[in-house]
């Protein structure tokens, strides 16, 4: 099979895809350490001593901006999709959650002003000047309602932003769309507020790809960043694992198990469902990762007998071997510049994090504390690498380390196995899978270790999250 990836034009492909059904209970991935079990999360289980992991809370980059939301008034029908909650109230609920998660804003109670959103127009109310006394720097209000009925209905939303310090209106937005995009309206407004005050894209419209159990299979899903609107992407009845995004958010690359002892690295276009195979070398082909510019695919393969790291040029399909070592190497993750890779190797005895240049040179060990460190994920800001560490109590937890190895932080504690960290595009949050509630689900946490939030609630097995780039 041959194929060509064009990140601007999409995926052109040719070749037949296999459709035979295969299920199996277990498959050893590499050097007897990583095991995939139906109904069990992917984990390295090894028994040996470990040194202490120190705990430290990171500090926020800046003071949060206090924002007061007077309200989003309901001015029309609730709509069937909104149940008993009116459209305005639903938008307000989502907006507040988005602003809280952004870590840019803190929410201030403006009830002391005695204002009602439904009585406000597009101009600031004189009482807004008193918002500073209640601690607010920004005041937000609006209205929303449904016009029309059935398939002819539309949601109309108007939202306004007043800056207390400058005593002026700094934003006014109007959104129109079907009832199905009510949450998207709130997400978009939240992202625009983040951009207005930081100059950076918000994360409210980002997506998270993940793996979910479907019978005896593992299939890929994509959901909103807050866990809503999950959508199934693959439906093979096989194992589809380790999804990673293309830089333009149009594609997912992942490991596909379609025959016993045969793993390929596939790519799927989300809008069309078109799917093709990128890597089909003999043996294991796992842990794919696209470079920040999409021009290279790093992955692990055992087709030459040992699990080594390779780099494929997605434009020419030329493959370069990056590592040459008797130990097993896997799980590459790119630095934001695309000039370096972090990866996992057991060349020091147990799995540890190593760094190297993108061409395979300048290999050096990064982690030294503990006998188990795996699943690295380089932050988009470049200042941290998240990974899974094993504590002295034999617990698998989420940790951070700086690329120079000088600072190390353990973010999570408590019961369960944590796995597969992935960064938000703003570098302020992480998602990961964990069995802390008994079953494998996906959680979000701030980079300072605060505001742990479970974002999947259905099913018995959700794992391997991958946070999309910003829209």
Image (cartoon, rainbow, N blue to C red):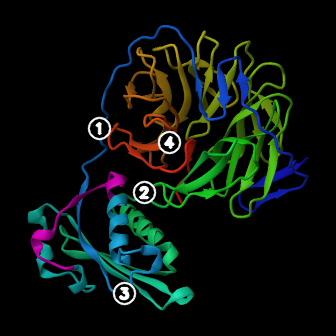
**Residue 13: image location, x then y, percent:** 85, 56
Q: Nearer the viewer, mark 1 or mark 2?
A: 1
In the rendered view of the protein, which quadrant contains the C terminus? Answer: bottom right
Per the image, label 4 sits on a secondary structure element best described as: strand
Q: Marks 2/4: CA distance?
A: 29 Å
Q: Find disc 3 in the rendering and name its residue.
A: 76
Q: Is residue 101 magenta?
A: yes
| First reached walking from the N terminus: tag 1 or tag 3 | 1
> Where 241 sits versus 123, above or below?
above
| First reached walking from the N terminus: tag 2 or tag 3 | 3
Q: Marks 1/3: CA distance?
A: 43 Å
Residue in the image at 59% along x and 18% along y: 351
Question: What's the magenta region?
Answer: 99-116
**Residue 152: image location, x then y, percent:** 54, 89
| First reached walking from the N terminus: tag 1 or tag 2 | 1
The residue nearer to you, when weighing 462 against 186, is 462
> Which mark identifies residue 200?
2
> Which mark identifies residue 441?
4
Residue in the image at 41% along x and 74% along y: 83
**Residue 103: image location, x then y, percent:** 33, 51
């Amino acid at each position: 099979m041959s194929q060509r990836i064009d990140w601007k034009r999409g995926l052109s492909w040719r070749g037949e895809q296999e459709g035979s059904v295969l299920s199996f209970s277990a498959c050893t991935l590499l050097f007897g350490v990583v095991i995939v079990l139906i109904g069990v999360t992917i984990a390295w289980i090894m028994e040996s001593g470990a040194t202490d992991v120190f705990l430290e809370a990171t500090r926020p980059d800046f003071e949060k901006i206090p924002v007061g939301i007077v309200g989003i008034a309901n001015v029309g029908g609730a709509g069937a999709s909104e149940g008993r909650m009116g459209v305005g109230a639903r938008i307000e609920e989502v907006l507040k959650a988005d602003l809280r998660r952004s870590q840019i804003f803190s929410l201030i109670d403006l009830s002391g002003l005695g204002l009602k959103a439904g009585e406000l127009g597009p101009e600031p109310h004189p009482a807004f000047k008193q918002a500073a006394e209640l601690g607010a720097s920004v005041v937000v209000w609006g209205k929303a309602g449904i016009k029309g009925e059935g398939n002819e209905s539309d949601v109309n939303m108007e939202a306004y932003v007043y800056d207390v310090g400058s005593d002026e209106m700094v934003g006014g937005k109007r959104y129109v769309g079907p009832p199905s995009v009510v949450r998207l309206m709130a997400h978009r407004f939240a992202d625009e507020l983040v951009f207005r005050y930081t100059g950076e894209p918000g994360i409210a419209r980002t997506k998270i790809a993940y793996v979910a159990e479907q019978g005896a299979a593992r299939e890929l899903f994509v959901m909103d960043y807050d866990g809503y609107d999950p959508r199934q992407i693959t439906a093979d009845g096989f194992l589809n694992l380790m999804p990673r995004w293309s830089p333009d958010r149009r594609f997912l690359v992942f490991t596909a198990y379609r025959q016993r002892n045969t793993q390929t690295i596939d790519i799927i276009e989300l809008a069309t469902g078109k799917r093709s195979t990128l890597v089909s070398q003999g043996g294991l082909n796992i842990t794919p990762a696209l470079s920040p510019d999409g021009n290279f695919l790093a992955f692990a393969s055992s087709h030459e007998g040992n699990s080594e790291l390779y780099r494929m040029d997605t434009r020419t399909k030329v493959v370069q071997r990056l590592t040459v070592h008797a130990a097993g190497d896997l799980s590459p993750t790119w630095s934001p510049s695309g000039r370096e890779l972090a990866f996992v190797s057991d060349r020091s005895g147990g799995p540890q994090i190593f760094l190297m240049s993108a061409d395979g040179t300048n290999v050096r060990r990064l982690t030294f504390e503990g006998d188990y460190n795996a699943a690295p994920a380089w932050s988009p800001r470049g200042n941290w690498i998240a990974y899974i560490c094993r504590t002295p109590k034999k617990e698998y937890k989420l940790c951070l380390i700086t690329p120079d190895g000088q600072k190390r932080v353990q973010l999570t504690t408590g019961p369960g196995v944590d796995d597969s960290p992935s960064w938000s595009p703003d570098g302020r949050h992480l998602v990961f899978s964990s069995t802390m509630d008994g079953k494998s689900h996906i959680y979000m946490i701030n980079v300072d270790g605060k505001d742990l939030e479970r974002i999947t609630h259905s099913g018995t097995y959700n794992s391997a999250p991958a946070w999309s780039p910003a829209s």
